[in-house]
Image: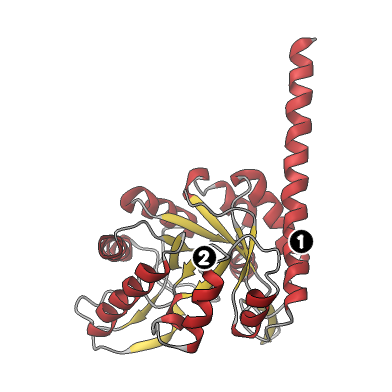
Amino acid sequence: MSDLSGVGLGLRHRHFQEFISDKPDVPWLEIHTENFFSQDSTAAKYLAKIRQDYPVSAHCVGLSLGSAANACPVRAQHVQNIKATIDWLQPSLVSDHLSWSASDKGHYLPDLLPIPYTEEAFNVVVKNINQVQDVLQRQILIENPSSYLSYLNSPIPEWEFLSMLVKKTGCALLLDVNNIYVSAHNHGFDAQMYLENIPRAAVQEIHLAGYSIDNIEGVDVYIDTHGHEVYDGVWQLYEKAIERFGAIPTLIEWDTDVPELAILLDEKRKAEAIITGVKNRDKVTISQAKNKQRV
């Protein structure tokens, strides 16, 4: 387990100076690793200063763990760039998505593309996770994706696929509650049932974010845009997640139309209130159980 605790924020460029000068009360920060490949960049120099006061989690977007490309030079170089970055940054956690973006022809696509949940795809992802963990010499976390379409041949439920990865590779999970909510709406599965089928010990981080709604041919499709406050339905699902997994380190993620820091701090306090509420209910339940035993 990591040394992170509480509710952290995604570190974005417009807030760099505030974290250096004001040192807001945030227990930890998450960065997008690819933004800091060059240690000589202005962004990396800001991060080095911020890192002195805040623990950091490194969230990657380009490891292409679902790619079947066996000899993609771009992907191989990307893994080495990730290693160089985390070697100097020394983050508490390293994570990436259950997706692909690199082809066997050396093309790198700037997107998190879905994979089919088949035995063949499972073996590919296992191989890639093992390779990355061997190179980095550390465990990585795999984030569940948001999705909008389903493959015709995808017989393994996503929650089962993730659980199998944990068992086979020793990786852990970054549980994106917003992604579960979005995908549950788009595909019609039960979001709480999803949570109940994820191993408790596997989850080491949780993400919360906002989504947008697009109406496509008369159907509302939820899109994981990370550009909005967390919706009520996601907060309710987050409460269920805390009840099941405990007070897991949680991130407020906001990537598009990034607002002023005060708004993110408000979202942080909402998450903290839910964690506190669940803890207090648990204490009452334990106390009541002890009283019954005395009687």
Left or right: where 123 falls relative to 94:
left
Q: Residue at x 25, y 78 (%)?
A: 76
Q: Residue at x 48, y 82 (%)?
A: 45
Disc 2 secondary structure class:
strand
Disc 1 secondary structure class:
helix
Inter-mark Cα distance, 1 to 2: 19 Å
The residue closer to the viewer here, 93 or 246, is 93
The quarter of the rendered structure image containing the C terminus is top right
Which tag is nearer the camera, tag 1 or tag 2? Answer: 2
Specify which label sits upstream in the sequence, 1 or 2. 2
In the rendering, at what x and y percent does residue 24 appear? 70, 68
Which residue position holds label 1? 269
Q: Can residue 234 be seen in this snapshot?
A: yes
In the rendering, at what x and y percent does residue 246 appear? 62, 45
**Quarter residue 188 falls in:** bottom right
- Above or below for 37 versus 265: below
In the rendering, at what x and y percent does residue 94 appear? 43, 64
Q: Mark 2: which amino acid?
A: Val
Left or right: where 130 falls relative to 198:
left
Could you say which disc has been placed on residue 56 in the image? 2
Q: Residue at x 65, y 70 (%)?
A: 209
Q: Which residue appears farthest toward the top when viewing the image?
A: 295
- Above or below for 132 versus 291: below
In the rendering, at what x and y percent does residue 19 appear? 64, 74
Q: Residues within 10 Å of mark 2 (few under 14, many from 20)?
A: many
